[in-house]
Image (cartoon, rainbow, N blue to C red):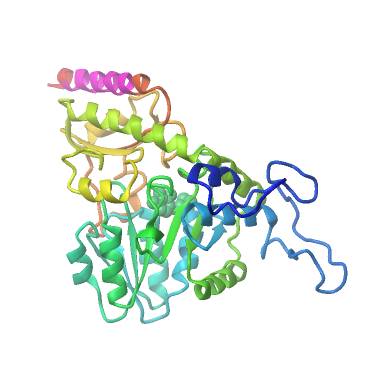
Amino acid sequence: MSRSDWSDARFETRAIHAGQDADPATGAVITPIYQTSTFIQEDVGVHKGFEYARTDNPTRSALQEAIASLESGSWGLSYASGLAATQNLLYLLRPGDHILLSNDCYGGTYRLVAKVIANYGIDFSLCDMSDPESVRAGLRPNTRMVWAETPTNPYLKIVDIEAVAAIAHGAGARFVVDNTFASPYLQRPLELGADFVLHSATKYLGGHSDVVNGLIVGNDRDVYDTLKYLQNAAGAVPGPHDCWLVLRGMKTLGIRMERHSANAAAVAEYLQHSSLVDTVYYPGLASHPGHDVARRQMRDFSGMVSFTVNGGYELAREFVASTEVFQLAESLGGVESLVEHPGQMTHASVAGTGAEVADNLIRLSVGIEHVDDLLSDLEAAFSRVGASRLAAR
Ligand SMILES: *Cc1c(COP(=O)(O)O)cnc(C)c1O
């Protein structure tokens, strides 16, 4: 027996079952990868709900239903990447509209708005969204969209979702929350008043650094019709195998996020006591300015930790090249730990914009390896760069 309505089940159960009933054609327990571009019609226009795979594909439908359930939305849409999803949402804006963006947002989001969308008559400006008053001050009469990330990237600032939703709505703007860094296991923006949740499923949802995918979730039916139309009309859809990988990743989201959060808390605590570290940015630390809001709106603090070293770019560069368990690479949210230099890597595209990051900043995506191996890897890297610094004196 299978049931299709999982709305009364808990998060971990829905992650495994929502949208993922046994395949009606064969009984396969796991949603099949429907690797087909087209579907047979019994007569003209008579079919089983699928015609052409850009428009709809059963593996994608399963993913869309699953993420809608996990984000407490009524619908979900999937795209070829997080930025393809971002672009689809930005198509809701018209020439003359203004979008207010976080000054600490994903570099690619900034690049898409500032270098591409702005060429089509859409205005944008940046503000510090961790301060609701700065959001209020940044609004203009033509602001139609407010776009936040929380925690932000790479400084892990916390945006009060409920407060900013109220401010955006008061001005007649839609409020989008990029929930990539938290995942729905830790934070559900729609429950706090956001209009749309956006994900780079490439990160925690996929969780294994083996797929690029994007998702949007919301509740408004009219906007769904527009976005669904745009998904097909603009065509940046994911292949069925990619959708399947995200579905598989999402089944273990809860247990992964718990381990990511526990390991990151230990790493942040360790970094605070290193003599080569200046400032540690982690919302789980009581000293973090957004700690109280994070505690209120998140179930735990996720796996991202940033810190500055007390030296310049050279020391930071040496450090990121010195770790072994933490591999030097862009991206985040996979089971393996990664280290990167935002100024030269993920955030190079914001150079010269006022949204730059410090050149002694290092970002960690803390994985789910054994925490002792992570801590000793950091320890070893610090002693390597510490020794070379002494030798240089
Ligand atoms: C990676 C990322 C994106 C972009 O997603 P892609 O899947 O790489 O296109 C957007 N927002 C955040 C916070 C990200 O980390």
Q: Residue at x 30, y 59 (%)?
A: 161
Question: Residue 81, percent across and down?
Answer: 52, 54
Q: Quadrant of residue 112?
A: bottom left
Please give the name of the residue rendered at 32% of the width and 33% of the height, measured from the top-left corner. Answer: 264
Name the residue: 31% across, 80% down: 142
Residue 334 in sight: no
* Picture residue at 79% right of the left edge, 61% below the top: 39
User: Does residue 234 show up magenta in the picture?
Assistant: no
Q: Quadrant of residue 284?
A: top left
Work out whether residue 348 or residue 200 is closer to the camera in this orientation and state it: 200
- Residue 368 in percent (x, y) is at 42, 29
In the rendered image, which quarter is residue 122 located in? bottom left
Q: Position of residue 202 (x, y in %)?
A: 49, 46
Give the main secondary structure, helix, strand or loop, of the magenta stretch: helix
Compared across the picture, whether 369 is left or right of 251 comes to: left
Whether residue 386 is in magenta: the answer is: yes
Magenta extent:
375-389
* 1 vs 145, nearest the viewer: 1
Q: In the displayed image of the protein, which residue is found farthest to the right?
A: 43
Left or right side of 174 for 254: right
Quarter of the image for the C terminus: give it.
top left
Q: Is residue 289 above or below residue 37?
A: above
User: Relative to residue 127, is residue 199 depicted above or below?
Assistant: above
Q: Quadrant of the N terminus?
A: top right
